Image (cartoon, grey):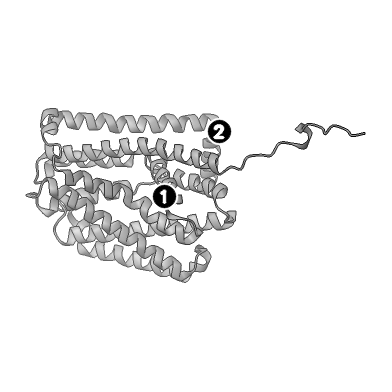
Amino acid sequence: MPLKTLIQQVQWGLQKPLGQQLQRYGRVLFVAGIVGWLLYRLTQIGWREVYEGLPRTPWFYVLWLGLYLLLPATEAFIYRALWKIRWRRVFPVLVRKRVLNTDVLGYSGEVYLYLWARRCTDRSDGHLLRTIKDNTILSSVASTVAVVLLVAGAVLGGQFALVDLLGESADPVYIAAGGVALGVLGMLAVRFRKAIFYVSGRTAAVLLGVHVLRFFAMYALQVLQWWVVLPEAPLRVWATILVVGTVTNRIPFLPATDLLALGAVLGMTHLLEASAAVLAGMLVVRSVLDRVANAVLFVLTGWLERRRFIVSTPSVAPMEAERPLPTPTE
């Protein structure tokens, strides 16, 4: 059977009620498996040790808040420029978009953003779809560039704890080949930019630069957050955790990729030159804070959105037929 026909049949089957039900069960089983693995690893490390290793410094939580809000704040400025909309108007919607992409399904947040923008902006459907598509593509490209640079820097600088396990795959020749391939893809994107992007080339370049800077700001804040808890740990520990977590989080269409990244890191704590209990405490607290914030902010921003919609909806004048008839005069 041709591959294209097989893919079409799979897509057709997934759209059926049974296929959608299997997808829901699959996501639940996937997340349950990750949670089970996390509980197993934390039991091996020791619950008491993990509790004693929980972050005590308030700077850990201040930096967590900055990390949490970095993505929606950056995208709020982007869509403010693309849609001519107030930053504070779109920011809560982008918080909900972040929650949907993190805890429901990858790119479900973009669908929600489009449906919201159709109702709450004066832009055409085509403009909304194309700008969301362009921003999503440029964010993915920036993510790939940032990950490649991060991995290359960690491996070439000897700051990656798995470099001994990678063997020949860590050879600089392979990294250089990956860089060349990335450069070729970049040149192709520039050559065919008019067929790919709706926004102008200058706007696309600016958006790409903003996203790349966002990713490196996120890396810096993340390492700083870990460092304030365990400043004596060598840089290779933070570089390894950052590389593993970043690469795992880039896997598309999977729910709870942050939990998957947490499980991957906990599975390799024996390779790191730091306390496994402290590392587990930091990562578990970060995951719990993300989950709590996602739940609270999703409910809060939804309530604010409904309240704003009710307030902005004009009252309907009574119909002429419902008005009392005037008394006839002689």
Q: Along the horizontal axis of the image, is 66 left or right of 295?
A: left
Q: CA distance from mark 1 to mark 2?
A: 35 Å
Total residue callouts: 2
Label 1 vs label 2, nearer the camera: 1
Q: Nearest the camera: 181 or 243?
A: 243
Q: Amino acid at mark 1?
A: Phe
Q: Which mark is residue 155?
A: none
How far from the left and from the top, in percent, is residue 113? 48, 47
Q: Residues within 10 Å of mark 2 (few under 14, many from 20)?
A: few
| Farthest residue, direction right | 330
Above/below status of 199 relative to 8: below
Secondary structure under the numbered disc 1 in the rendered image: helix
Which image quadrant: the C terminus? top right
Secondary structure under the numbered disc 2 in the rendered image: loop
How far from the left and from the top, in percent, is residue 115? 54, 46
Identified at 40% across, 70% down, the residue is 187
Identified at 15% across, 40% down, the residue is 55
Instruction: Read off the residue under disc 2.
Output: 16
How far from the left and from the top, in percent, is residue 53? 12, 36
Q: Amino acid at mark 2?
A: Lys
Tell which circle, 1 or 2, labels the residue nearer the N-terminal end: 2
| Farthest residue, direction left | 232
Q: Quadrant of residue 40?
A: top left
Identified at 27% across, 57% down, the residue is 217
Q: Along the horizontal axis of the image, is 8 left or right of 266?
A: right
Q: Which mark is residue 91?
A: 1
Q: Quadrant of residue 46?
A: top left
Q: Nearest the camera: 83 or 149?
A: 83
Residue 67 visible, this angle: yes
Residue 162 visible, this angle: no
